[in-house]
């Protein structure tokens, strides 16, 4: 599976909607494949019903999304020549709609001559339909994450990315400590500012791109960043617990206890984590908008919800009006 399980291009200019081209990925596992085949006939009238409820003008050109337990339906508007079509996708719930549409649009631009034939011909040549399906299946190979330990965007991927990012941050902290240990930057008036810059770059800025690349999923990037912020603030406060208390007492005449240190650790950890989250989210979103989730088996209960929704949409489909 390549996470776009199903795709259909629907012409809603008729009274019920007509499917001009559809696609079920050939690697879809058998149970899901059979379910998708069983609801294919309901997709055109369902799409027509959704668009007709608010009219084409109010439906607009932006991507629309319906979420289910493990999957989502995404609907986008495609203008081919002087005619509008609606493209409906059934994908993994973790796939970003912009990534789905970006990938399809890139394929559409590459295969535009073939789409000209498929969308224009009546009747359509079956060989052209199948040639387009084969081309799309091959095209998707380069547009999903390959490593299941990082690319599934599930709990396991979250834990693995957290461990990797913590290790990277530990290495960066160790490098900055080693540089200071060798050159004593913090002990010299002319180099202590360079040490501060080094710490800011290596421990606050550089971990962000690594976290964003490991997760490639904004929610995970933000969570990993916050956890790492609290983790490293706690480690630092434990390592420098005695010097920190002595420094506050000698410099400001303030005596602090365990509660004050814990509060300071929480505040500093939150600030550190927030900075990491801001930086890592930029990189995570970049990849999330371009790559699909690693292939995984979708539980059948999620498919049943989609099937019931499709059936209900067909049963409750409104009568066509002149406005729509």
Image (spheres, helix red, strand yellow):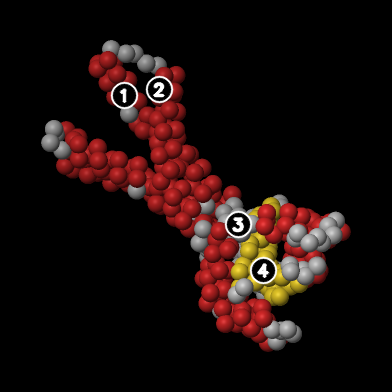
Q: In the image, is 176 to the left or to the right of 58?
A: left
Residue picked out by circle 1: 244
Which of disc 1 and disc 4 is earlier in sequence? 4
Residue 133 on image: x %, y %: 64, 78
Give the quadrant of the N terminus.
Answer: bottom right
Disc number lying in front (1 or 3): 3
The alpha-carbon separation of the residues under discs 2 and 1 comes to 9 Å
Provide the secondary structure element on which disc 4 rests: strand
Residue picked out by circle 3: 62
Residue 102 on image: x %, y %: 54, 64
The alpha-carbon separation of the residues under discs 1 and 3 comes to 54 Å
* Residue depicted at x 41% and y 33%: 271
Residue picked out by circle 2: 261
Answer few, some or many: residues within 10 Å of disc 1's Cα (few below 14, many 20 plus, some between 14 and 19): some
Residue 307 falls in which quadrant of the image?
bottom right
Residue 136 on image: x %, y %: 60, 75
Residue picked out by circle 4: 85
Answer few, some or many: residues within 10 Å of disc 4's Cα (few below 14, many 20 plus, some between 14 and 19): many
Q: In the image, is 193 to the left or to the right of 1?
A: left
The residue at the far right in this view is 315
């Amino acid at each position: 599976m390549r996470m776009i399980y199903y795709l259909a291009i629907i012409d809603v200019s008729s009274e019920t909607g007509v499917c001009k081209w559809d696609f079920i990925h050939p690697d879809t596992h058998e149970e899901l494949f059979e379910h998708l085949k069983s609801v294919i006939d309901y997709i055109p009238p369902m799409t027509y019903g959704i668009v007709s409820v608010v009219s084409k003008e109010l439906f607009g050109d932006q991507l629309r999304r319906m979420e289910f337990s493990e999957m989502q339906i995404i609907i986008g508007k495609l203008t081919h020549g002087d005619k509008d079509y609606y493209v409906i996708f059934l994908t993994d719930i973790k796939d970003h709609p912009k990534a789905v549409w970006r990938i399809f649009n890139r394929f559409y631009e590459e295969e535009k001559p073939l789409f000209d034939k498929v969308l224009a011909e009546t009747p359509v040549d079956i060989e052209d339909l199948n040639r387009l399906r084969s081309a799309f299946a091959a095209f998707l190979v380069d547009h999903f994450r390959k490593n299941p330990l990082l690319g599934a965007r599930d709990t396991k991927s979250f834990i693995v990315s957290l461990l990797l990012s913590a290790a990277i941050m530990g290495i960066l902290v160790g490098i900055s400590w080693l540089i200071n240990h060798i050159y004593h930057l913090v002990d010299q008036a002319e180099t202590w500012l360079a040490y501060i810059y080094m710490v800011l770059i290596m421990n606050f800025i550089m971990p962000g791109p690594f976290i964003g690349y490991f997760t490639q999923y904004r929610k995970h990037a933000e969570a990993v960043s916050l956890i790492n912020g609290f983790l490293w603030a706690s480690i630092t406060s434990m390592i420098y617990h005695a010097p920190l208390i002595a420094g506050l007492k000698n410099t400001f005449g303030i005596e602090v206890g365990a509660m004050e240190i814990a509060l300071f650790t929480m505040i500093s950890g939150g600030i550190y984590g927030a900075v990491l989250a801001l930086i890592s989210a930029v990189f995570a979103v970049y990849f999330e908008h371009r790559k699909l989730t690693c292939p995984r088996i979708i539980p059948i209960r999620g498919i049943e919800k989609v099937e019931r929704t499709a059936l209900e949409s067909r049963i409750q489909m409104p009568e066509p009006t002149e406005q729509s």
